[in-house]
């Protein structure tokens, strides 16, 4: 819903802390990174799987008899084979301890992560104690443990975790705390993050960054009321919301149809310090103004942006083109398009979406051809938009079996070996009195993104041309030529539709 790249400072800090945690690996473990013997790995994993419910003594005896080189990389590979099963990994961990294996924060965090994913809270807690005693705790440990505890709704233990770590010499630090709050909010565990902030307030004083992440978290799950409460609490404590928090709140207000409140917030920013507004803020406001058809207000904001020395990017120009075309001002939209210096996919998408909004699918396809001529290769989103414009969101219901989308889709599913899905689709559309569900064009294109699909799209394009549907034929032909397989998507060229398909007859 919201892009986290807005909070660049925190993201960079998180990356730095993660790299710092990796650097704590000992030189011996680093030197041990070598290709793992797959045969040995298979034998060890087989023993662990078969004897995971047996006695520890029997399992350790079997592992001792099995010849393998226990290295740092080998241990991690074994853990990767059981990502959600704690029992074999924990028993292998106990065996490694008996062999005096030099554990690192990375290996311990791996075991901790598996215990958390398998919801074994007691084991996770014991591992946290072990790591604290061995002084192997790092920021990654906080992230793994708190995510697992919050997911399991162990809120009391989430709070106790910070006290536990403090007892082992890891002091209460707002930087580490903010990193944990950030991760929880990104994983939509914002209620648990708020509980942490409230309960640990006496030990860790929240700062502006803490509140910003809470605002983001509640906005991300659509809880505008709680987001507003956090916003007010931040202001009451004397913290000034930064542009990242303001943009998050703006976007949430717009998405929840609180357009007037969003504009009031934007106006307060302009009155307070218009020079502080950045490109992303203007882009957000102009996009939503154009979506609502408020072209007059969008032009005012656009001119203000230019006066402040902020240069418009293609995404803003694409939004303006869409707003103009969707309001029927097609000539003005094309004029803006012609004046763009470096045209990219954002500008063409704005034009195509606007034309499709006016039910002008043929004109949108002509723009599709033009963008290919100018070297701008379509994306999956382009194809889906055009198919929805030509066929409708529920698929084409033509009488001719050549162009009946039910026939094309069901026949294709059967050929792809997806008979069950084909049967379910037929059952849904048999009774025409029932509204047919929205057709998933993404799934349709995905089903035939293979070498067989290349042939199928060519055949489909030929059949569509036979009945005069040249626009649809060009779209499917282009997709089959450039998007049907991974290799074709990687090596997309600039060949136009006209060069690779039969040209449309003159009108």
Image (spheres, grey):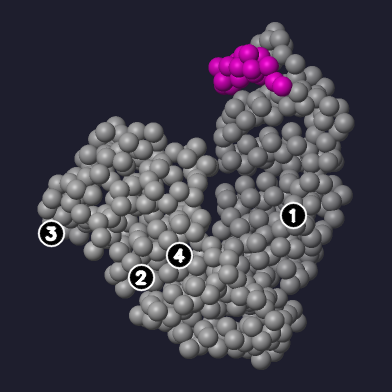
Residue depicted at x 59% and y 41%: 117
In the rendered image, residue 228 lying in the magenta stretch gets the answer: no
In the rendered image, residue 45 lying in the magenta stretch gets the answer: yes
- In what element is the residue under mark 4? helix
Whole-angstrom CA distance, mark 2 to mark 4, is 10 Å
Whole-angstrom CA distance, mark 1 to mark 3, is 55 Å
Q: Which residue is mark 1?
A: 14
User: Between disc 1 and disc 3, whose residue precedes?
Assistant: 1
Residue positioned most to the top: 65
Q: Which mark is residue 355?
A: 2
Task: Judge the density around disc 1: few (<14), some (14-19), many (≥20) Cα neighbours within 10 Å.
Answer: many
User: Front-most of 337 and 94?
Assistant: 337
User: Between disc 4 and disc 3, whose residue precedes?
Assistant: 4
Residue 244 in the figure: left or right of residue 451 = right
The C terminus - image quarter:
bottom left
Q: Which residue is mark 4?
A: 349
Residue 424 in the figure: left or right of residue 58 = left
Regarding residue 393, the answer to whether it shows in the image is no
User: Between disc 1 and disc 4, whose residue precedes?
Assistant: 1
Q: Give the percent coordinates (x, y) of residue 343.
A: 54, 65
* Magenta residues, start to end: 35-58
* Image: 115 above or below 356: above
Q: Which residue is mark 3?
A: 433
- In what element is the residue under mark 1? helix
Are the residues flagged by discs 3 and 2 in contact, CB closer than 8 Å?
A: no
Task: Judge the density around disc 3: few (<14), some (14-19), many (≥20) Cα neighbours within 10 Å.
Answer: few
Are the residues flagged by discs 1 and 4 in contact, CB closer than 8 Å?
A: no
Q: Give the percent coordinates (x, y) of residue 151.
A: 57, 51
User: Front-most of 22 and 51?
Assistant: 22
Whole-angstrom CA distance, mark 1 to mark 4, is 34 Å
- In what element is the residue under mark 3? loop
């Amino acid at each position: 819903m919201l892009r986290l790249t807005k909070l660049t400072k925190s993201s960079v800090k998180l990356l730095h802390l993660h790299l710092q945690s990796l650097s704590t690996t000992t030189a011996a473990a680093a030197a041990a990174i070598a290709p793992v013997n797959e045969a040995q790995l298979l034998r060890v994993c087989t023993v662990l799987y078969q004897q995971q419910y047996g006695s520890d003594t029997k399992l350790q005896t079997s592992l001792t008899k099995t010849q393998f080189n226990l290295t740092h990389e080998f241990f991690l590979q074994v853990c990767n084979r059981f990502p959600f099963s704690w029992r074999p990994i924990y028993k292998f961990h106990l065996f490694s301890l008996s062999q005096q294996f030099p554990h690192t924060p990375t290996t311990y965090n791996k075991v901790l992560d598996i215990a958390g994913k398998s919801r074994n809270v007691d084991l996770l807690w014991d591992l946290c104690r072990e790591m604290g005693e061995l002084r192997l705790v790092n920021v990654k440990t906080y992230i793994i443990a708190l995510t697992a505890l919050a997911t399991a709704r162990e809120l009391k233990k989430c709070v106790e975790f910070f006290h536990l770590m403090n007892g082992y010499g890891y002091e209460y630090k707002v930087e580490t705390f903010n990193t944990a709050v950030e991760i929880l909010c990104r994983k939509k565990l914002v209620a648990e993050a708020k509980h942490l902030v409230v309960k640990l307030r006496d030990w860790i004083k929240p700062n502006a960054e803490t509140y910003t992440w809470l605002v983001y978290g509640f906005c991300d799950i659509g809880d505008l009321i709680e987001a507003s409460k956090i916003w007010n609490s931040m202001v009451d404590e004397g913290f000034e919301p930064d542009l990242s928090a303001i943009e998050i709140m703006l976007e949430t207000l717009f998405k929840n149809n609180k357009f007037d409140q969003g504009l009031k917030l934007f106006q307060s920013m302009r009155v307070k310090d218009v020079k502080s507004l950045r490109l992303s803020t203007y882009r957000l406001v102009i996009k939503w103004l154009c979506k609502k058809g408020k072209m007059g207000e969008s032009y005012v904001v656009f001119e203000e942006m230019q006066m402040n020395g902020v240069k418009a990017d293609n995404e803003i120009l694409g939004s303006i083109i869409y707003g103009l075309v969707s309001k029927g001002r097609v000539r003005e939209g094309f004029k803006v398009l012609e004046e763009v210096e470096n045209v990219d996919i954002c500008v063409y998408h704005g034009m195509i979406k606007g034309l499709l909004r006016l039910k002008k699918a043929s004109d949108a396809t002509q723009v599709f051809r033009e963008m290919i001529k100018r070297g701008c290769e379509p994306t999956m989103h382009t194809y889906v938009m055009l198919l929805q414009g030509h066929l409708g969101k529920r698929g084409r219901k033509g009488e001719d079996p050549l162009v009946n989308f039910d026939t094309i889709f069901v026949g294709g599913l059967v050929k792809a070996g997806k008979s069950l899905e084909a049967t379910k689709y037929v059952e849904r559309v048999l009774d025409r009195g029932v509204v047919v569900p929205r057709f998933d064009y993404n799934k349709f294109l995905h089903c035939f993104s293979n070498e067989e699909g290349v042939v199928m799209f060519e055949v489909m394009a030929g059949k569509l041309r036979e009945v005069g549907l040249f626009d649809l034929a060009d779209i499917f032909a282009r997709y089959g030529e450039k998007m049907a397989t991974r290799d074709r998507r990687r090596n997309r060229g600039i060949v136009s539709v006209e060069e690779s398909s039969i040209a449309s007859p003159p009108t």
